[in-house]
Amino acid sequence: TSDGGKVVGTIEVSLVKMGEIEDGDTDHITTVVQGQKCALAYECAAPDSVSGKDSLPLLNAGNGSGAHPLPRLANPLMFVEVAQWTIAKSLVQSCFLNTFVSYLQDRVWANMGKSLNCIIATVDKLIERDGHNKEGGGGSSSQDGDMEASLEDSITSHPKEDWYEQLHPLIITLKECMGEVVSRAKQSLTFVLLQELAYSLPQCLMLTLRRDIVFSQALAGLVCGFIIKLHTSLHDPYFLQQLHTVGLIVQYEGLLSTYSDEIGMLEDMAVGISDLRKVAFKITEAKSSDDLPVLTGRREHYVVEVKLPATVFESLPLQIKEGQLLHVYPVLFNVGINEQQTLAERFGDVSLQESINQENFELLQEYFSIFMEKMPPDYISHFQEQNDLKGLLDNLHQNIQAKKRKNVEIMWLAATICRKLNGIRFTCCKSAKDRTSMSVTLEQCSILRDEHQLHKDFFIRALDCMRRNYSTKADDGMPSDYTEEVKRLCF
């Protein structure tokens, strides 16, 4: 028992010297644990003769009878009964005994178990020897109920050198056994992982291909947006300074629902946009008439080289002309607005949309912190007077946490923050046709009202005019079924 508590097991012990293997039942040691009987062949050299790895005994292979014959060794064999030494010792023995039964046929675990028991036996012997010395010298004896105090006194009173000489080789052996166990575990885990990989390899290849396809589409849009933004802001010194000091914020407005097939589209879009963080831009001087962007790098790091004419290139800041990489910070905010989103909100799950919005809000907030930290103080003071971005960010966070159905306020706030931070905006849905066209025309009228003094009485007229004009252009070059859909939606 363990201090009068849970029964650990029953052990039969006998002492056999070298070369003595009897015909009876005394040539082995058995233990009963949890109703099962198994053989536990344990050899331990005397502590005085223990030295290095040679003291490590091995467990013989089982013969299926529950008893293991003892090996013939050069040193005497000593079987040690489980002793009530300390609570820690009992816990170690009981825990390892269960493990030992499970891995009885494994020599690695057997060696480790016997090495640990050697240490326990040696400590028992040292404590017993020290107790006899104290009794012989007239020292006071401790009471039976105060075992831990006696152990502490014995350890502190015994010469440290003697303890070190006795325990050091055993601890070295235990350390080597533990290293062998760890090595075996690593090898086994590697084998299991390779087996699983063999079955999942085709699926991994398909997922990699799918991810590459999505990333290529996202990268093409990003390059177009970056070049347009660069050409329209070449005469803005603050934008160019922000470009090489902080980077460029890129906001994607998604209108996909979290229902049916569009869930997979939204998942692909979230991964593709997050992969754009591995993309950096580099502006160079065009040496010829070929000014197409050039993509270099590999999966974990891409560099897009944007070429500018010599006259324009000379007007750029020195850091950009020297080839400094310009980083982008892509963020995605999605709000489903069609009838499928109504079904998702009432009968389905919108946790994907909520997690995407929350994660990308944190990225947007991180970019704003970097912006406020690295931009010049004079620009920051003027910028804060013109824009209350801190309030807009707080409002956006409140709307994301509110979890309101079809909360289009999230889209308006994210778009406003992006424009005030000189960022790039993209709007998309399933086919970039119905929902996207309605969102883009609404945003154009909002910009006219907020930045170009469009009177509120003409807002609806301007919106209708844009949508009619969009429908007319569609009639000129689009298929009939496409134009009919646009007409139905607009009119």
Image (cartoon, rainbow, N blue to C red):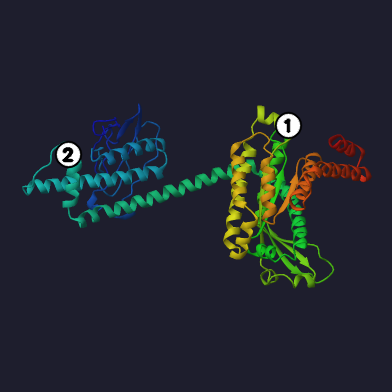
Q: Is residue 442 left or right of residue 395?
A: right
SS of the residue under disc 1 = helix
Q: Which quadrant of the structure image shows residue 462? A: top right
Q: Residue at x 72, y 70 (%)?
A: 316
Amino acid type indicated by mark 2: Asp
- Which residue extends farthest right? 476
- Identify the image quadrant of the C terminus: top right
Q: Which mark is residue 406?
A: none
Q: Is residue 284 left or right of residue 1?
A: right
Residue 140: % across, % down: 8, 45
Residue 341: % across, % down: 71, 33
Amino acid type indicated by mark 1: Gln
Mark positioned earlier in the residue sequence (2 or 1): 2
Circle 1 residue: 340
Circle 2 residue: 146
Question: Mark 2 or mark 1, which is nearer to you?
Answer: 1
